[in-house]
Amino acid sequence: MSLTVFVPCDAASVAVGANRVADKLACFADERALDLNIIRNSSYGLFWLEPLIEIETPSGRMAFGPVSPDDLDSLIEAGVFSAKNDFSNQAADMCATESGNTIHPLCLGLTQNIPYLRKQHRQTFFRLGITRPQSLSDYIAHNGFKGLKRALSLQPEQIIQAILDSGLRGRGGAAFPTGIKWQTVLNTPSTQKYIVCNADEGDSGTFSDRMIMEGDPFSLIEGMIIAGLATGATKGYIYVRSEYPQAFSSIGQAIGLAEQAGYLGQTIMGHDRDFTIILRKAAGSYVCGEETALLESLEGKRGIVRSKPPLPAIKGLFGQPTVINNVITLAGVPNILAQTDSASSGHRVGTSGETLPFQLAGNVKRGGIVEVPFGITLRELVFDFGGGTASGRPVKAIQVGGPLGTYVPEKDWDLPMTYENYKAIGATLGHGGIVVHDDTADMSKLARYAMAFCALESCGKCTPCRIGSTRGVEIIDNIRTDRNRDRQITLLRDLCDTMKDGSLCAMGSMTPNPVLSALNHYPADFGQQDAQDHD
């Protein structure tokens, strides 16, 4: 009787040796006559445990990790890969504890009981770790295309109403209500409309888009088709970050499989509705994550920001009405359509609906994906899920919302995380990225990095961003070397105000966020004695 072994295949797992584990395990199976069925599945996103391998048992999947190729000998000697193994529920419970481990030191117990997973509420990521990325049968067996099937029975207005009722807002950072954007495109007359997926995930410490494209690509495809049905669009583009070759390959294969199976093309699931998806590799510029710069790049031009109005929903790609959503927004759509109204609206705090996949990164002990409803606190995420710092030192600063996000001070770590609450304190949830720093971090250096990053990545179209970021680096250098520090700090604040109010896009207007929050909450790192209260 064959024993099924799961080894993840996403980029993060491969980077720490998953391919080597799978290859060596296959060689051992041949050499030692082990009857193994090795399946390359998607990753759960428990990155501190990767490579995480699982054994199929009558009780469920048994997890072991992190497993290196050198650990395979001892796992084999322990009988882990024997088809005759007896992983009872009792053994599963025991191997998850620090004492009484009866199987192997790397045994984590049943995967479903790992606290990091058990405490989550996965809606967009519920297939991650369970299915094979390129398996249509796996996808369908786990509610795949159920949302599309329902959408095909609805009128466009009904689809949009379901999205509005869910409270889904854009997960790319701006958090604009998804249904309103779709409604605008639907109501704008045109013979051709487009759905554009912004998969140019360039924020440091973020990886949720990559994980969907590599691990559950059909959910993105299904979401784009539903968006097309809702708005009258018949063509979609996916603009994938150039540094994501595995994601690009994965989504490309999935598009081909969906076309062959009749989910894309001229007659979607046998209906007289058509939708096609075109894959494009991004230009390698951070600013192309801004929606209008992305459109310029897709049109074959230099990726620079457009002035608004007109909005892309009215005049977007090739001058036509265009929906632009990021990967997580679109991948979350099928589940909303597949649920009843009461189920889909069950996780809502104010105008923050559904869930958000937070991404724990930086100096954190347990980094990875945490998908939970809005309302969780930063302290719960970083300490309950993340386990504090990887260095074991105290947490000093937590940046939320990517490289242009705010450093949230400790006094706000217990604030429920919603769009409204974070806006009230001058912060943003952004794409859900969370980067942790311990007490050795120099916040003036991090502030300087934000300005230098902006200077490097600015498209150069507007003066506040192009020149302001360069002057910002110079001013922070003057502050750090005490060249008339008090005057320079006043000048830095004035410069940040100019960038916030005068920049064309978020690149320039948000760069002051990390700079000012570092200056306000960590004054000692700038040579000041006390924090100053600045709005």
Image: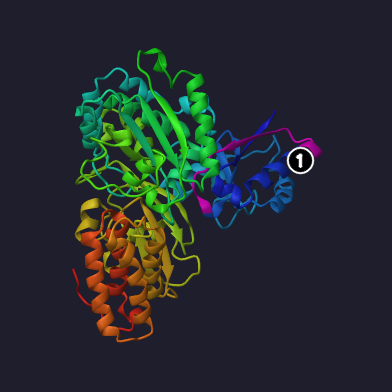
Which residue was labeled with disc 1?
27
Number of labels in the image equals: 1
Please name the residue shown 72% across and 53% down the image.
70
Q: Quarter of the image holding residue 39?
A: top right
| Most foreground residue, 361 or 266 | 266
The answer to whether residue 401 is magenta is no
Against 155, is 167 above or below? below
On the image, the x and y values in percent for residue 395 come to 40, 69
Q: Quadrant of the N terminus?
A: top right
Residue 265 shows up from this direction: yes
Res 176 → quadrant: top left
Give the amino acid type for the residue marked by disc 1 in the picture: Cys
Residue 64 coordinates in the image, percent (x, y): 60, 48
Looking at this view, name the residue that lies furthest to the right.
31
> Of 197 and 39, which appears nearest the observer?
197
Q: Position of residue 428 (x, y in %)?
A: 28, 56
Q: Is residue 376 above or below residue 269?
A: below
Q: Nearer the viewer, residue 282 or 427?
A: 282
Q: Quadrant of the C terminus?
A: bottom left
Residue in front for this viewpoint, 202 or 130: 202
Image spot of residue 439 (x, y percent): 42, 74
Q: Residue at x 58, y 41 (%)?
A: 9
Seen at 45% across and 28% down, the residue is 142
What are the residue bounds of the magenta stretch? Answer: 30-47
Dot 1 alpha-carbon crowd within 10 angstroms: few under 14, some 14 to 19, many 20 or more: few
